[in-house]
């Protein structure tokens, strides 16, 4: 039997039953009437199990097998993970302990107490090792595909986040630079954001940021708050909480930097842990897939960057960046954009992209600001339909695809290989789907384009263009 607790407050007593075929099921024995203290959207056994599964290290996390093997664990070993990491996270103050456990949250939480740097090294480098001493670590409850690790330095928590493997793809490894540069634009526009530095750890370049949560304040991904995950519902929620101006800022920043990865897991709300009240939108973070970080450098000289920008014009929210700006931004935002007329990125003292790429980015941001001012001033307001979207996360012929959008109107799709490397981004429109729905289109593309390439060991350069542009 186990307790789900909020700090030292018991919330749910449950047990885990193992089936005959390795399956596991959860049975709730008692649930607190203080439902306001429960994690978002937990109401029954099914939602509790989903919450616990989501809290476990994801399958697409870089070096997931090495991280688990270092502790003698296997993927989805729910009881093993609970025993070692106690479900502790640096996002909030929930944890899971055995029924007879007498320890206090103050003595185990990851905000105040030490954790294994050896495990952090495994998580960041993938270098396999067997840990002699097992203890809770934030690595076990941190999501995301890229290599990353938490470190405690001078009594503060920092996240080190690497890039895609530049040894596998010629146009890879630029995500840390994008984090560093995107934060400069946010600062120039006075948009609440996480600040990033660039450092090397064990010879690997990483973006570095300080954790913005603590025992008093949690981070709640917006996807755990919304039921339908539609733009309409999202707008209603940010207005209800009173953070619509910050939401507009997010839309504006993403359009400027061409951010493709603003999905419902990498932005959210800050929450007061004592009152359970949302405080507003969390500072913006995770801008690695922006500022053309997946674009080959030769596209700058040959002009293909324009095609690349068009192919990547969609936000992960399911609409183009220009559409979102025209729906939600106003003259106040246009005046804010005018600050960028002479903007230039500040170089890092040690680590930077090439001079050619940096010069291109400087020019792009200045011109993009002018484009968005025009979008706002034209007052083009597309019909605000209820942009209801579906989310598909499916395996097919050894690939995994993640689609967000409408089956017939189009949307945003990411295709991953067997090692969870992002190998293709498709931005589908209604014109692509005249003869088939989005899922059929994606699977047809995998079967007839990517699968044959895989069998013949085709080019290793990571591609991210639409099939219609090839």
Image (cartoon, rainbow, N blue to C red):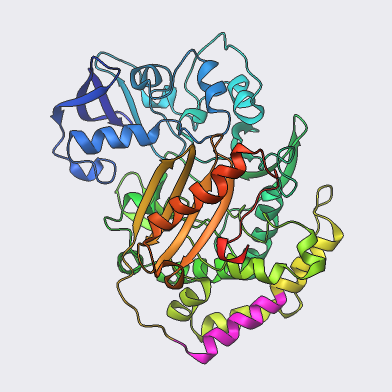
Stretch in magenta: 366-380
Q: Is residue 202 left or right of residue 240?
A: right
Evaluate whether residue 216 shows in this view.
no
Residue 255 percent across, percent down from the top left: 56, 70
Residue 233 percent across, percent down from the top left: 30, 65
Extreme residue in the top direction: 132
Q: Residue at x 63, y 18 (%)?
A: 128
Residue 119 percent across, percent down from the top left: 58, 22
Q: Nearer the viewer, residue 162 or 185?
A: 162
**Is residue 373 within the magenta segment?**
yes
Q: Nearer the viewer, residue 442 or 32?
A: 442
Q: Residue at x 36, y 61 (%)?
A: 437
Image position of 392 with respect to 361: above or below:
above
Q: Identify the image quadrant of residue 304.
A: bottom right
**Is residue 383 within the magenta segment?**
no
Q: Residue at x 32, y 32 (%)?
A: 52
Q: The N terminus is located in which quarter?
A: top left
Which is the main secondary structure of the residues drawn in magenta?
Answer: helix
Image position of 352 with respect to 191: above or below:
above
Extreme residue in the right direction: 355
Evaluate whether residue 439 shows in this view.
yes
Q: The C terminus is located in which quarter?
A: bottom right
Image position of 116 with respect to 112: above or below:
above
Image position of 62 with respect to 119: above or below:
below
Residue 392 percent across, percent down from the top left: 37, 50
Q: Identify the image quadrant of residue 101.
A: top left
């Amino acid at each position: 039997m186990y307790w789900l607790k909020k700090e030292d407050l018991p919330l749910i007593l449950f047990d885990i039953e193992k089936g005959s075929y390795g399956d596991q099921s959860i049975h709730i024995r008692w649930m607190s009437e203080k439902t306001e203290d429960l994690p978002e959207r937990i109401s029954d056994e099914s939602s509790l199990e989903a919450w616990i599964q989501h809290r476990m290290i994801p399958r697409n996390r870089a070096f997931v097998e090495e991280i688990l093997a270092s502790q003698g664990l296997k993927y989805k070993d729910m009881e093993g993970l609970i025993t070692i990491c106690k479900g502790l996270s640096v996002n909030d103050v929930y944890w899971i302990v055995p029924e007879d456990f007498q320890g206090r949250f103050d003595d185990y939480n990851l905000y105040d107490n030490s954790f294994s740097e050896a495990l952090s090294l495994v998580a960041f480098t993938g270098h396999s090792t067997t840990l002699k001493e097992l203890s809770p670590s934030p690595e076990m409850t941190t999501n995301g595909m890229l290599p990353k690790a938490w470190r405690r330095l001078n009594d503060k928590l920092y996240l080190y986040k690497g890039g895609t493997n530049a040894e596998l793809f010629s146009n890879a490894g630029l995500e840390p630079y994008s984090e560093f540069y995107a934060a400069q634009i946010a600062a120039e526009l006075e948009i609440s954001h996480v600040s990033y530095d660039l450092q090397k750890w064990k010879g690997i370049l990483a973006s570095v940021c300080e954790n913005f949560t603590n025992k008093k304040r949690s981070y709640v991904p917006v996807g755990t708050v919304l039921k339908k995950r539609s733009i309409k519902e999202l707008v209603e929620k940010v207005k209800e909480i009173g953070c619509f101006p910050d939401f507009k800022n997010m839309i504006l920043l993403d359009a400027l930097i061409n951010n493709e990865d603003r999905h419902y897991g990498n932005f959210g709300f800050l929450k007061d842990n004592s009152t359970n009240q949302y405080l507003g939108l969390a500072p913006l973070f995770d801008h690695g897939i922006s500022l053309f970080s997946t674009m080959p450098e030769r596209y700058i000289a040959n002009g293909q960057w324009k095609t690349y920008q068009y192919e990547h014009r969609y936000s992960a929210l399911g609409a183009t960046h220009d559409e979102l700006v025209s729906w939600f931004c106003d003259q106040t935002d246009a005046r804010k954009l005018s600050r960028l007329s002479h903007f230039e990125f500040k170089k890092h003292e040690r680590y930077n992209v090439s001079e050619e790429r940096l010069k291109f980015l400087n020019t792009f941001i200045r011109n993009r600001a002018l484009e968005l001012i025009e979008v706002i001033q034209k007052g083009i307001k597309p019909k605000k339909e209820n942009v209801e979207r579906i989310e598909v996360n499916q395996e097919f012929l050894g690939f995994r695809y993640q689609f967000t959008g409408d089956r017939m109107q189009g949307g945003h799709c990411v295709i991953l290989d067997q090692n969870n490397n992002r190998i293709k981004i498709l931005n589908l429109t209604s014109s692509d789907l005249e003869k088939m729905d989005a899922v059929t289109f994606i699977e047809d593309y995998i079967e007839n384009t990517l699968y044959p390439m895989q069998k013949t060991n085709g080019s290793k350069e990571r591609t991210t263009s639409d099939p219609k542009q090839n």
